[in-house]
Amino acid sequence: MTPARADRQSSMTRTLDSAAYLRRLRLDHPGPPSVAGLHALHAAQVERIPYEALEIQLRRPTTIDPHDSAERILRHHRGGYCFHLNGAGLGDALHEPLPLHEGRYVQGPLTFGMRPSQAEPGGWRFDHDPRGCFAGMDFRAERATVADFAARHHHLSTSPESSFVQTSTVERRDGDGIDKLTGCVLRRDGLSRSSARTIETQEEWFDALADVFDLPLTDVDAPERARLWRRVYAAHEAWLAAAGAQ
């Protein structure tokens, strides 16, 4: 048996601790599969599990095996980014799932679209709100596997050209809007209020992670925290310098 096949079989035999997962979501068991249950799970997921790429900033490699992602969420009270959370959340996008019907859908301050894809025959196109962090996605009408995304995950995790390497990113969606911590700038974009402020100290930055995004980072020790803050603040100063030069 090849190592790759052995890894796939090992992954297939692992199970998710669904009770722990529901506790992390602060959600009762939704009962038999239903549309209402799907909506409840999806909303709880994006409200409780932040979209975050701090492992990239910490220089701690991750896999995109779904069981490894679940382990990090459940055992270390962490979140994840695109390839850890896809299927459950898209950063500043969906608060609830969308039906596979062409149309426009309003969720809080954002409006999304679903339509047949012009790039993928038989597929679907998801159009993000113009204020979102990406334009949209085209989905093929075929099954995808973890292996399909491995190369892109490696690039986004390690390449100097990756926005996740260049800038620390944390987001959390709720029914009213989105909280974002991009570098040292903490922003709230919502129906009821919008605000932005710059965080100046390490203590305030980690307090924001814990209080706003429910990321106490108990798996990050003091020396790692200091290195992480220096990296984030240096990138912030470089961003300010570049903006001032324009």
Image: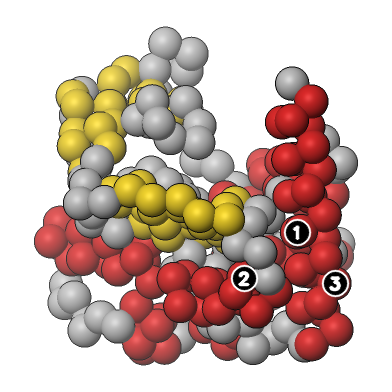
Alpha carbon of mark 2 to alpha carbon of mark 3: how far?
Answer: 13 Å
* Amino acid, disc 1: Val
Estimate the x, y position of residue 62 in percent, counting from the top left: 75, 65
For image coordinates 34% across by 78% down, the residue present is 25
Which numbered dot is residue 108?
Answer: none
* Amino acid, disc 2: Trp
Q: Is residue 97 above or below residue 18?
A: above
For image coordinates 68% across by 71% down, the residue present is 201
Residue 94 in sight from this viewpoint: yes
Q: Say which element carries label 2.
A: helix
Image marks 2 and 1: residues in contact by CB distance under 8 Å = yes
Estimate the x, y position of residue 213 in percent, counting from the top left: 47, 70
Q: Quadrant of residue 61?
A: bottom right
Which comes before the other along the chain, label 2 or label 1? 2
* Left or right position of 132 against 29: right
Q: Report which residue position mark 3 lands on.
A: 227
Q: Is residue 41 above or below residue 102?
A: below
Circle 3 Cα neighbour tier, 10 Å, few/some/many (<14 / 14–19 / ≥20) = few
Q: Is residue 212 above or below residue 91?
A: below
Q: Say which element carries label 3.
A: helix
Alpha carbon of mark 2 to alpha carbon of mark 1: how far?
Answer: 10 Å
* Amino acid, disc 3: Arg
Alpha carbon of mark 1 to alpha carbon of mark 3: how far?
Answer: 9 Å
Image marks 2 and 3: residues in contact by CB distance under 8 Å = no
For image coordinates 50% across by 32% down, the residue present is 134
Q: Say which element carries label 1.
A: helix
Which comes before the other along the chain, label 1 or label 3? 3
| Viewer-nearest residue: 190 or 44 | 190
Q: Report which residue position mark 2 lands on.
A: 205
Estimate the x, y position of residue 151 in percent, counting from the top left: 78, 42
